[in-house]
């Protein structure tokens, strides 16, 4: 790896692995194998944009795993406290349709099981958490498929630990293990989505269930009908399903799917992470809870000590002091505003992208009114993109976790401040370096 790349890259990435990948990336045999990825599309509209894979060094992977184990315990505390702690409930505000539902939601079983953590990285090897995706994290299936193909290409395949997400049916396997009793009751598992809505990976996800001899269909939950205490879709009884509906979309649809909502509240139907796990755990304001001293008493000191160094300064901007608001208004290059439950790069205002002070102040005023997250701007390292003639671009690190352990992940790179594949980013499969205990 050249000296310039070492200065821009994250210390936690393996330089020797990257050199090996670059070395084989132009071979004819590599090009032929990677052609298998051409069929994967972004929401059925364009070819999914993949990049060269990277590998996290063993020591840094263990640091990420320790962080996740502590962080998810803190999230579970927030979820468990949400119904009974009025201050917390007001601070991590939910939009009106969800607020009424959450007030009736059972807390039991709504801990985080499947999620994705998105980080920005520091050249020294540090990492800062930007957000948690506990509602319906994307990219987990495609990145695993890409990693599986690359494993057959890299010169020394034993250098990387085989990860769960390289298993071509892992998502269905996990769901059936988690909800096996409900799913096997009639051999049918729906994937809940809005008709005409976001469809990334869902056809491949459906194929996983079919490969396990479980019937699966993409189902708009507004089509469910309650009868005699059970839920039915086209006369098929539904016990459990994988919900792939963004929170803004769920809010918009909620008035027309009362039977589905009541089924979730009663436990008639199960979905991954439960309702509070999804809506509270996914809420970006949870970062503000962990950053804001007013909530320290809720959490064990040893967990905060592990997590807080990796949380940027964050607040519910509507709860900021006068001094904090003055700092936000006067130093826009230092801050980012985020709508708490939005996705795919939407609802993000980056202060350094706003040239006009008056425009920034208007964004701040709107954020106060709508109770957005205000977060300290976090710079990140860069990765070399060979499809851009070797240009260095920004990137993040997305790590997937299931049941308390890391199962895979990916890196997204982009020329924009928002490194999101939904905009114009590229996804790089991720490997974890094998340690002595793995060999």
Image: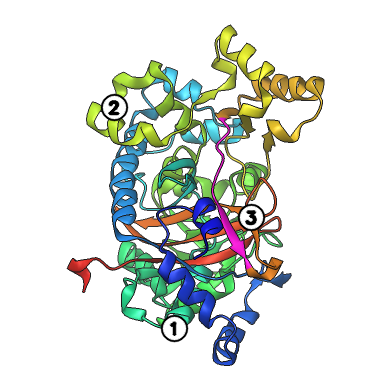
Residue 435, image x and y in percent? 24, 65
Q: Nearer the viewer, residue 178 or 312?
A: 312
What's the CA distance linking mark 2 and mark 1? 43 Å
Q: Mark 2 touching mark 1, by CB under 8 A?
A: no
Judged left or right of residue 395, residue 290 is left
SS category of the residue bearing label 2 = loop
Q: Which mark, by number, is residue 299?
A: 2
SS category of the residue bearing label 1 = helix
148 in relation to 78, above or below: below
Quickly name the residue at label 3: 393
Quickly name the residue at label 1: 211
Residue pictured at 29% horizontal, 36% vertical: 306
Which residues, given as a range, are shown in magenta?
376-385
145 in relation to 309, above or below: below
Nearer the N terminus, badge 2 or badge 3? 2
Q: Nearer the viewer, residue 356 or 206?
A: 356
SS category of the residue bearing label 3 = strand
401 in relation to 26, above or below: above
Q: Residues within 10 Å of mark 1 (few under 14, many from 20)?
A: few
By what rule are the colours in the image chosen? rainbow
């Amino acid at each position: 790896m050249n000296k310039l790349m070492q200065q821009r890259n994250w210390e936690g990435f393996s330089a020797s692995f990257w050199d090996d990948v670059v070395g084989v990336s132009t071979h004819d045999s590599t090009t032929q194998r990677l052609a298998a990825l051409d069929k994967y599309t972004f929401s059925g509209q364009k070819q999914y944009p993949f990049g060269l894979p990277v590998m996290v060094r063993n020591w840094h992977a263990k640091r990420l795993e320790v962080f996740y184990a502590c962080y998810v315990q803190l999230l579970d505390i927030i979820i468990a406290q949400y119904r009974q702690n009025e201050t917390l409930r007001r601070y991590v505000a939910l939009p009106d349709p969800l607020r009424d539902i959450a007030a009736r939601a059972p807390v039991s079983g709504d801990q985080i099981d499947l999620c994705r953590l998105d980080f920005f990285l520091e050249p020294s090897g540090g990492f800062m958490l930007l957000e948690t995706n506990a509602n319906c994290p994307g990219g987990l299936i495609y990145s695993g498929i890409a990693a599986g193909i690359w494993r057959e290409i890299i010169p020394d395949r034993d250098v990387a630990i085989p990860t769960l997400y390289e298993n071509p049916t892992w998502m269905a396997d996990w769901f059936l293990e988690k909800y096996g009793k409900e799913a096997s009751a009639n051999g049918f598992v729906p994937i809940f989505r809005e008709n005409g809505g976001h469809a990334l990976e869902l056809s491949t996800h459906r194929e996983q269930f079919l490969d396990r001899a479980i019937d699966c269909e993409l189902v708009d939950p507004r089509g469910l009908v309650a009868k005699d205490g059970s839920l039915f879709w086209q006369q098929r009884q539904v016990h459990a399903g994988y919900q792939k509906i963004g929170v803004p979309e769920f809010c918009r649809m909620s008035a027309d799917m009362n039977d589905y909502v009541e089924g979730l509240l009663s436990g008639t139907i199960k979905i991954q992470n439960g309702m509070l796990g999804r809506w509270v755990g996914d809420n970006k304001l949870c970062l503000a809870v962990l950053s804001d001293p007013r909530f320290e008493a809720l959490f064990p000191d040893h967990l905060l000590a592990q997590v807080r160094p990796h949380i940027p300064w964050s607040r519910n901007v509507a709860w900021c002091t006068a001094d904090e608001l003055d700092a936000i208004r006067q130093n826009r290059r230092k801050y980012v505003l985020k709508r708490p439950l939005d996705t795919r790069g939407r609802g993000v205002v980056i202060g350094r992208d706003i040239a006009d002070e008056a425009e920034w102040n208007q964004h701040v005023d709107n954020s106060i009114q709508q109770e957005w997250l205000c977060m300290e701007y976090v710079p990140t390292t860069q990765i070399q993109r060979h499809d851009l003639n070797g240009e260095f671009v920004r990137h993040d690190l997305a790590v997937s976790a299931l049941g308390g352990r890391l199962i895979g992940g990916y890196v997204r790179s982009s020329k924009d401040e928002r490194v999101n594949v939904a905009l114009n980013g590229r996804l790089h499969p991720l490997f974890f370096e094998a340690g002595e205990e793995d060999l």
